[in-house]
Amino acid sequence: MSSNKKKRLSHSKVSFFKNEDKNKKLFSDDLSNDEEEDSKSSDQESEDKNTVYNLLAMSRPFRNPAYKNNKRVKPIKQIISAEKALDWPIEFPTYWSISAPPSFKPNKKYCDITGLQAKYKDPKTNLRYNSSEIYQAIRVMPPGAEQTYLGLRNANVILK
């Protein structure tokens, strides 16, 4: 292997030691061609031990500086107004015409006092509550106060 080839190979690898390239140059100048052929395998072994093909050590930019994004992100209002401007068939699904089917899961029930998820319901007042402390507060309420809480969730009973 000629000394020029060795120089090119040594520059393509990242080495752990600073003076390794200098030592290789001095060593390659001293050896004759016959000795070089004999020690080719031992040089390769020592070279493999001391050098690393480390891509992480190379400095590279994270992004390609020449890349330009030509796409512009449109807000949903622009998309809807653009769709409304076009003439679509009546059956064609659009953003404003798609409606979801009813859910198979039961609706969540919330406490009328705290707004937390309710596990219980008072049979007398029909107020929902989530703990025994809230139940004690419901028991102490004056008559007619529960109707205001029921009115908030549109479950109040209006007597005529």
Image (cartoon, helix red, strand yellow):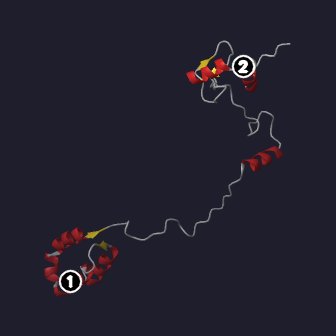
Split into 4 quadrants, where in the image is the C terminus? top right
In this rendering, would 135 be left or right of 75?
A: left
Split into 4 quadrants, where in the image is the N terminus? bottom left
Neighbour class for label 1 at 10 Å: few (<14), some, many (≥20)?
A: some
In this rendering, would 92 be left or right of 63?
A: right
Say the numbered circle drawn on residue 123.
none
Residue at 68% of width from left, 58% of height from top? 72
Residue 63: x percent and y percent?
A: 52, 65
Comes first in the chain, label 2 or label 1: 1
Residue 151: x percent and y percent?
A: 76, 24
- Dot 1: element: helix
- Residue 19 higher or lower than 75, as above or below: below
Q: Quadrant of residue 132?
A: top right
User: Given the image, on which type of amino acid does mark 2 rest?
Assistant: Pro
* Alpha carbons under labels 2 and 1: distance apart: 102 Å
In this rendering, would 25 be left or right of 105?
A: left
Nearest the viewer among 14 and 32 is 14
Residue 101: x percent and y percent?
A: 68, 27
Nearest the viewer among 45 and 100 is 100
Residue 95 visible in the current orientation:
yes
Residue at 63% of width from left, 62% of height from top? 69
User: Given the image, on which type of amino acid does mark 1 rest?
Assistant: Ser
Residue 130 visible in the current orientation:
no
Circle nearer the viewer, 2 or 1: 2
- Residue 40 higher or lower than 121, as above or below: below
- Dot 2: element: loop
Residue at 76% of width from left, 50% of height from top? 78
* Residue carrying label 1: 28
Neighbour class for label 2 at 10 Å: few (<14), some, many (≥20)?
A: few
* Residue carrying label 2: 142
Residue at 29% of width from left, 83% of height from top? 4
In this rendering, would 103 be left or right of 144?
A: left
